[in-house]
Every structure is written in C-alpha cells, then in structure tokens.
Amino acid sequence: MIMGNAFAAITVMTVDIGAPFVLAYGADPAAIGILALTCGYCGTLCTPMAANFNIVPVAMLDMKDRMGVIKKQVLPAMVMIVVQIVYMLIAQ
C-alpha cells in the first residue's frame, strides 16, 4: 500500500530497482514479474489511488460510504499479500 498501485509505481520500481538486484542473485524473471504485479495489486485494492477500482464504482453505484469499496477489498488484499510473502520466503 505504501508503494502505490500495480499500474505504475510497482512496475517502475520493479523494473528499475527490484529486478536488477534479484536477477543478480539468479532469480527467475517470470517469477519476479508475477510477484511484483500481484503484490502491487494489494496496494491497488486498499488505496483510493486506483480510481477505476475504488472511486468510480462508488460514484456509479451512488454509495453513501466513500470508502465502502476499499473496506470490502481489505480482507482479500491482506490474504493476497500474506500468500505473496510466504511464496517469496519459500522460493528463496
């Protein structure tokens, strides 16, 4: 969530910063991409930064709770980030 969303911030950070370090240790490029994007979506689901996921549905559905969509996505996002962390620890 701190890093941003999977559309811009995670992609730039993975390609520019993360991938060169992990590739230097012999990591699989496909695994790096998959982990980076799916971890990025955890931030996308829990922040209002991704308008198409979190702000537009509230406006289109005329929801009273502005953060209603985010509140419903927190649990799946937390499960997803835990799975990603476990996978990173196992795949070392």
Image (cartoon, rainbow, N blue to C red):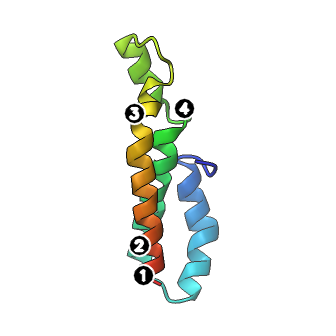
Tell me residue 85's x, y (percent). Answer: 48, 67
Crowding at dot 4, Cα within 10 Å, few <14 / some 14-19 / many 20+, comes out as some
- What secondary structure is found at the residue carrying circle 4? loop
For the residues labelled 4 and 2, the Cα–Cα distance comes to 27 Å
Crowding at dot 2, Cα within 10 Å, few <14 / some 14-19 / many 20+, comes out as few
Residue drawn at 39 percent across, 22 percent down: 57
Q: Which residue is mark 1?
A: 91
Residue drawn at 44 percent across, 77 percent down: 29
Tell me residue 44's x, y (percent). Answer: 49, 43
Q: Which residue is mark 3?
A: 72
- Extreme-left residue of the structure: 61
Label 4 or label 2, whichever comes before in sequence order? 4
For the residues labelled 4 and 1, the Cα–Cα distance comes to 31 Å
Instruction: Give residue 48's mark.
Output: 4
Label 4 or label 1, whichever comes before in sequence order? 4
For the residues labelled 3 and 4, the Cα–Cα distance comes to 13 Å
Report the side of 69 relative to 9 (left or right). left
Tell me residue 68's x, y (percent). Answer: 44, 24
Amino acid at the residue labelled 4: Pro
